[in-house]
Amino acid sequence: MTTLTESTAATQLWELVALNEYRLPESPVAQAAGSGLALYKRWFKSRQSAPSASLIKPSELNALTDQQLEQIAPESDFEPAIAAINRALHDWLAEENPTEAVIVILAPPHSAYAEIFKLWAQQRAWRLLQAPNIEQISTHDPAWLNALTSSSSPWVLTHLEQCFLRHASGMHLLRSFLNAATSGTLGKGIIVCDSWAWAFIQHIWPGRLPVMLTFQAFDQQRLTQLFTRAIHSNTKNQYIVRQSVDGEDIIPAEQTGEDLKISPLLQHLAMYARGNAGIANGIWRANLEAEINPPGTEVVKQKTETLWILPWQQLHHPDVETYVKRDEIFILHALLIHNGLTSEQLARVILLAESQLLAKLFYLQAANLVAEQSGHWLVTAQAYPAIRELLLTSDYLVDQL
């Protein structure tokens, strides 16, 4: 277990940076650095063997409840990120008529950047623009764009990916909006766009690229700090996280004045998630377990409660290769390009009947590759790294993050 030095510990968890300053977490081995997930997985599997016995048996553990997860691995602590936005955009915000009227924020899947900027906009009383509906997109309805010019106040659009559909009649309104926004016609504004959608948009919109920013990747140092702060912020209970096979501390008890330790498991997780804190947190939440109290056993209140997680090489990951064939890969790619679609919208993008699409979506859902949220189908956080790697090796368009 390596040590987090004081200088590194002082680094801000959230940092808004230019796209060319974005850095992926380093591989645990120099040979795999910059060579992609597939090489890393081959290296790791060839050098790691599963321990023969566990410190605590799997039958003695159970997944955490939603209430427990919200206590020790919350998904919505956005205030540090909002502070980072204010630091990074301080000069631009102070200018009444900046040279660059519009800034684009690239948001990888499950990053929650759209939610962060929505809250930021509300705190600063900026306008929140609503995306057009599916009929406005399909008919190129000018009323939506015309309505945006009714005010000169600064604005935020949090979901550019919801302003188009990937078919012949579904992109005209998007092009018109981007032309107006980047020319300064709409005034000062921020666009938050899914990173996969932006990769596609660059192929269908020839306009001048605006300023591009994103949050810096969460490497092993940042990820360790993020998880440690989340667990230790609970005021009712103290928690530690240990590896269930050998008892190694992953998140030790809080000890003031001592250096923060970085577990190899969190090094692997940071790289596997490509520095995406939302993806890493989704995998983390899915694999944390607590001890089961047998029926009739008196529960003894402990000062510190231990949570458990398997070693990295034993963690369960959704089986992508078994379930994903030609039609399924089309579906997954479309869902990533749009950051989620309803089955009706998906039927307009994929040349399959909606009933066939639903059958395939339920099939992918059973394999934990997709999930439905508020009527929209999304690629799951747990499956995302493997699906991205499959699309990359299959020569599909992928995002930059």
Image (spheres, grey):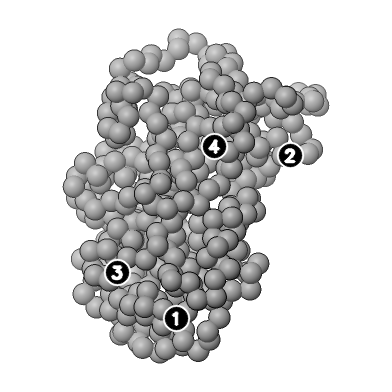
In percent of the image, x 28 and y 54: which residue is there?
A: 333
The image's mark for residue 288 is none
Callout 3: SS: loop
Residue on which disc 2 sits: 234
**Circle nearer the N terminus (3, 4):** 3
Callout 1: SS: loop
Residue 269 in view in this figure: yes
Residue on which disc 1 sits: 186
In percent of the image, x 62 and y 54: which residue is there?
A: 83
The image's mark for residue 208 is 3
Asked if labels 1 and 3 touch by Cβ distance under 8 angstroms, the answer is no
- In the displayed structure, 204 sits above or below 401; it is below
Tag 3: amino acid: Arg
Q: Nearer the viewer, residue 63 or 177?
A: 177
Real-space Cα separation, disc 2 to disc 1, in angstroms: 44 Å
| Other residues around mark 3 within 10 Å, as few (<14) / some (14–19) / many (≥20) | few
Q: Nearer the viewer, residue 153 or 248?
A: 153
- In the displayed structure, 187 sits above or below 25; it is below
Residue 236 drawn at (x, y percent): 79, 38
Residue 36 drawn at (x, y percent): 29, 35
**Circle nearer the N terminus (2, 1):** 1
In percent of the image, x 41 and y 78: which residue is there?
A: 184
Real-space Cα separation, disc 3 to disc 1, in angstroms: 16 Å
Asked if labels 4 and 1 touch by Cβ distance under 8 angstroms, the answer is no
Real-space Cα separation, disc 3 to disc 4, in angstroms: 34 Å
Asked if labels 3 and 2 touch by Cβ distance under 8 angstroms, the answer is no
Q: Nearer the viewer, residue 79 or 314?
A: 79
Tag 1: amino acid: Leu
